[in-house]
Amino acid sequence: MEATALSVGKSVLDGALGYAKSAVAEEVALQLGVQRDHAFIREELEMMQAFLRAAHEERDDHKVLMTWVKQVRDVAYDAEDCLQDCSVHLKKPSWWRLPSTLRERHRIAKKTKELRARVEDVSQRNLRYQLVKSAAGSKSADGAELSVSAGATTMSGIEEAQRQQNKSKADLIQLISKKDEGLRVIGVWATSDVLGEKSIVKRAYDALKRNKKFQCHAWISMARPLNTAQILQDIVMQFVVDSLEEETKTHTTTSEAEDLRRLWTTKEDDLADEFRKFLNEKSYLIVVNDLSTVDEWNQIRPCFPTNNKGSRLLVYTEHVKVASLCVEPLTLLPEHKQFFPDKTLYAFYAKTTHILELKILEEKYALDLFTEKVFGEITNLNEECPELSKEAELIMKKCKGLPLAIVTIGGFLAKQPKTSMEWKILNSHISAKLEMNQGLGNIKNILNKSYDGLPYHLKPCFLYLSIFPEDHDIKLGRLVCRWTAEGYSAEVHGKSSTDIAEGQFMELIDRSMILPNKKTYFSCKVIDSCQIHDLLREISISKAAEENLVFRLEEGCSSNTNGTVRHLAVSANWKGDQGDFESMVDVSRIRSLTVFGKWRPFFISDKMRFLRVLDLQDTRDLCNHHLEHIGKLLHLRYLYLKGCRGIYHLPDSVGNMRQLQTLDIRWTGIMLPKTIVKLKQLQYLSVGGINRDRSDLLDMFLGNCAAFCIHEPTTETWRDRCAECWCVTMPALARPFSSGISLPRGARNLKALRTLGEVDISGGNTLKEIKSLTRLTKLKVQGITRNCHEFCFTLLVLRGLESLAVRGSLHGCLDDDTRLPITSAASGCAAIWSNCRHGSCASRIL
């Protein structure tokens, strides 16, 4: 719990502090005349962040400290909400809105003053109770050493520099020699070589080579233009020289020396493969000197195998970005160590943490292991104990192939009466059993260690998964967009927030915290969805509830009394009414609302001022008038209406949601409102996909006409049915089948768009609009007819395109005698045409 509180607290603080430092926040503070308050809040948040890092390193379990950490977390949430509220309400005020703008200014300025008082109170509380030791106290040894150094006035400048170099060399050797079986890449950055920083690296390398800490050693300097084969030959030459020196000392020839000689004579085409084979069984230390770009690193990195021999790659560079991005094991926020007090030499490295790898058994082997633990031998339950078969299946479903869970639960049941009732009780109350039973508690303890081993930036991401129901297939795209909207990922070192979020997803998979699902046919990702193991989900739900991060509104739950809720998930089995809803949860501070199952009009209200995520995928009974006032959600960044088939219209006030990043209205029949072009932050726009033929639409239309006549009871209003008729049914009956929709005029202003589809490009100006969206990486279109040449020219402009999907009848469009302007700039798109020549309904290049 303590680790969770610290991680969530630090994550929230990072988001609040990042926004407090932004130019937008500075400008807003200037407009309001509260620069001093803003600066004070920013500086206090920085101090709180430093204290939380210190507390995390101390791993203090002090209850008072944890209470203070939670107060810091709540203040950080409110600080971020307040700062963003300022920017949203005060951007570009119009003269006709002057009275309301003045009221907003007064309200926000007052709120900022109150926030400053709260921040000051929380900060003083730490000083009053001395909850976290200061950095001076925890680093007393270093402080003493520095004071001795400062007092040694008799030491000459040369001797002092030599002493500092020796200390830096020892620190670097210690960092390289740190016990860790996996390959580690350490990036060393120096601003210059004035003080001999490179010599420190060389001296550390020579010392490790003399002590024979590694089996193979090499120091290479990068030459331009880059020649990978030449680099490998230089490394092999150094290996050969070392081997000859060893032969001279021992007067013996080893098999390793013979292998090196063969490697030296290998042809260039085979050298990389043979080199990796040779190094794969060796522990090696290789220094890459004078690396200038990440591209250079990406070219040579595959040459070095990732083995479990404790190998090290040391990258020396004068570019900090290169040093930080080369670090392995892969980490989003590498640790760094300063070797000189005047900031001339740094090392970037990944902090090693305990990772519990959760191996998953196939269904047959999992059941065999279970029956062996229960009965002492592998047993066919269907034949020998058919009454237990059904309950055993449910137990296996809970365990999901996790050997730890299977062995522990099987061992527990081996000591219990082997009856279906006993096993049914276990299935019904497995969460309580994990808490109360000492034998089963080992599962939770071990899985908790796996959670505790997560770096702090991954813990909130993992807890966020508790929003989704049991066995829910969580799509990568949906999760990544949500994490980005929530601020769980931010641009780092030139990497987009989306790339960072995808990296977090893969890191959770690598750590076995989530289970990857097989990719779908139309996906360009190796893994495009995941599930969370039932037992890990229990941990996620428990810890998220402790931190007031997620509140799950489901059948049998009690009202939330622990504080302010940030994320609300309404389960499909909740049957309460509006009174129950309002009494159970305070929605004034929630940042995300996710509804599974049936929609109720009271789920959304004007009180949700800070809502960022509204996810209503496949929600039933959602009608147009339920979203009439959605334009008031000025903080909304993510609107997901996919599969809400009862809605056909979005109000023009959608254009007010200037923070919106993701809009998904697939399988809804919604036509884009013209005001969509005002959403300059929009990055993901997914539309279209109405898979209904004309006869179905006609039947639906006639059915609705009959319903109007007999006044059939329904949640739809007359206006809803009119919208359905005129916006969906009648246009569809008047034209051929189309699953795409048209872009409104002015869509070229959506410069931030990265994903767009499915768009009907048969209209005259649509391709011209798309051509201006140069940041697109994923595009899905339909409606190619005689405009295929113009479509090709559009693709040439979209140089960043990574995924292209085309739907529609293409007969005669791309005949063999058609000359397409495909050049090397768009060679990746050429493959689509070979598919399209045959008139396939849906051809893709991914």
Image: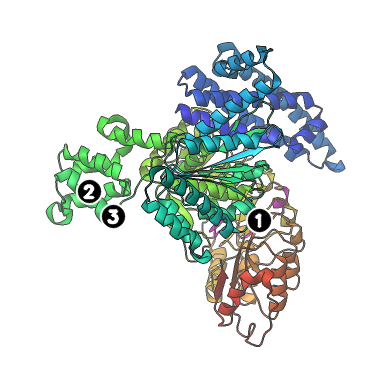
Q: Which mark is residue 466?
A: none
**Near-viewer residue (74 or 450):** 450
Residue type for callout 2: Leu
Depth order, front residue of 718/404: 404
User: What's the CA distance linking mark 1 and mark 3?
Assistant: 46 Å
* Residue positioned 47% across, 29% down in the render: 3
Does residue 386 lie above or below 96 as drawn?
below
The dot on residue 363 is 3
Circle 3 SS class: helix
User: What amino acid type should be assigned to the residue bearing mark 3?
Assistant: Glu
Residue 174 in the image, given as x and y percentages of width and height: 50, 31
Q: First in sequence: mark 2 or mark 1? A: 2
Within 10 Å of disc 1 (Cα), the crowding (few <14, some 14-19, many 20+) is: many
> Quarter-wise, where is residue 26 in the image?
top right
Q: Secondary structure at mark 1?
A: loop
Q: Is residue 650 magenta?
A: yes
Tell me how the rendering is colored.
rainbow
Give the quarter of the image for residue 277. bottom left
Tell me the residue that label 1 is attached to: 650
